[in-house]
Amino acid sequence: MSGDIVLEADNLARSYPIYRGAFAKPLTLKALDGASFTLSRKKTLAIVGESGCGKSTLARVVTMIEPPTSGELLIGGMNVTTAGRAALRALRPKVQIVFQNPYGSLNPRQRIGAALEEPLLVNTKLPAAERRDRAIAMMQAVGLRPEHYDRYPHMFSGGQRQRIAIARALMLDPEILVLDEPVSALDVSIQAQVLNVLGGLQERMNLAFLFISHDLSVVRHIADDVMVMYLGRPVEHGPREAIFAHPQHPYTRALLSATPVADPERKKERIVLKGELPSPIAPPTGCPFHPRCPLAFERCSVERPQLLPSRGVMVACHAVEEGRAEATPVVAG
Ligand SMILES: Nc1ncnc2c1ncn2[C@@H]1O[C@H](COP(=O)(O)OP(=O)(O)OP(=O)(O)O)[C@@H](O)[C@H]1O
Ligand code: SF4
Ligand SMILES: [Mg+2]
């Protein structure tokens, strides 16, 4: 691993058995079906895609909440998939997660100070005074005041609660922060404040972010790299500028067309995708996007496209590979 890379995922997959009664063989749902990427210090990889495409499953695997079904995960150079218990215990504090709803991770009967000190109490031998100092310093780092120390979660606004969840996730000085829709439940004005706090902390604490969001206008602001997923698979992956300025995969183009643009002069062509998201239990043959794809042709229903380099990013699309995507607008007019 190069010096700045803190995590390497190679073909990570996670499936779940779907039971259909005592005598039927369980079906397999491939929630995550082969994702490869790296995370680097002070960099943000954004994961985008519709509901059910496997974003949270990826978050749980990266955070070691669940093991991958196949593929490899290296954190700090250590192979998580083959690591023993002691090694895993040492690795866990390095990767922390913040969820969309901080109520889920905050105990309503626990004061904020105690909530922040808990990870230190469990994982370190620091004396009480030192734990308190660190909790208060972290509260200030996320924009809370020392007098908030003795308050309970219900006494805070949604934005403040999310700051508390971020502070708690950072108490053990992790290297990687997984953020699963961290601002999606907040008002737009509050979103910007929380994103600013995150940006400052990333810089100061050398953090690598895996930032999950369905909101491309947020991703446009914070991501260095973007990975677009469809039915558990990455379909386009590369630097943010390249993907926003020149999206190549028809699915990325459709997602972007639905995002408001800052420039009112630029004509927006809204691409409406045909049909529903198919079930991941029985994904379509060939390219799983083909039943909804405006560019689909014969090859698409029989052969699964692989991620291949194209114009500085990786794209899984036969039309891009054959040069058809450029010639055919995804939407007319
Ligand atoms: N424990 C589980 N058992 C069975 N299926 C699961 C399990 N967890 C997730 N799934 C399925 O895996 C697929 C991916 O789910 P996941 O929660 O990762 O999607 P997501 O992209 O995070 O969606 P959202 O944007 O709604 O949060 C979905 O079809 C989901 O129903
Ligand atoms: S491979 Fe075919 S169906 Fe899939 S995105 Fe490309 S053109 Fe569309
Ligand atoms: Mg999710």
Image (cartoon, rainbow, N blue to C red):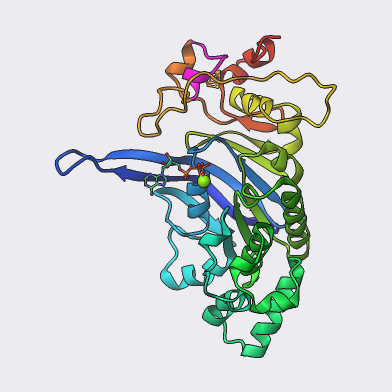
The image shows residue 224, relative to residue 175, as above or below, that is above
Q: Quadrant of ligand 2?
A: top right
Q: Looking at the picture, how far across and down is residue 270, in whole percent?
A: 67, 20
Residue at 46% in and 59% down: 65
Q: Looking at the picture, how far across and down is residue 75, in whole percent?
A: 56, 60
Q: Is residue 142 visible?
A: yes
Residue at the left extreme of this rendering: 23
Q: Looking at the picture, how far across and down is residue 44, in whole percent?
A: 69, 50
Q: Is residue 96 left or right of residue 282?
A: right
When asked about the image quadrant of residue 172, the answer is bottom right
The number of numbered badges drawn on the structure is 0
The image shows residue 121, relative to residue 3, as above or below, that is below
Q: Is residue 2 visible?
A: no
Q: Nearer the viewer, residue 298 or 27?
A: 27
Q: Quadrant of the N terminus?
A: bottom right
Residue at 54% in and 75% down: 110
Residue at 65% in and 13% down: 331
Q: Looking at the picture, how far across and down is residue 219, in whole percent?
A: 70, 42
In the image, is residue 290 part of the stretch drawn in magenta? yes
Q: Is residue 92 left or right of residue 226?
A: left
When asked about the image quadrant of residue 101, the answer is bottom right
The image shows residue 54, relative to residue 177, as above or below, that is above
In the image, is residue 236 part of the stretch drawn in magenta? no
- Magenta stretch, main secondary structure class: loop
Magenta-colored span: 289-297
When asked about the image quadrant of residue 278, the answer is top left
Q: Nearer the viewer, residue 23 or 190?
A: 190
Q: Nearer the viewer, residue 164 or 27?
A: 164
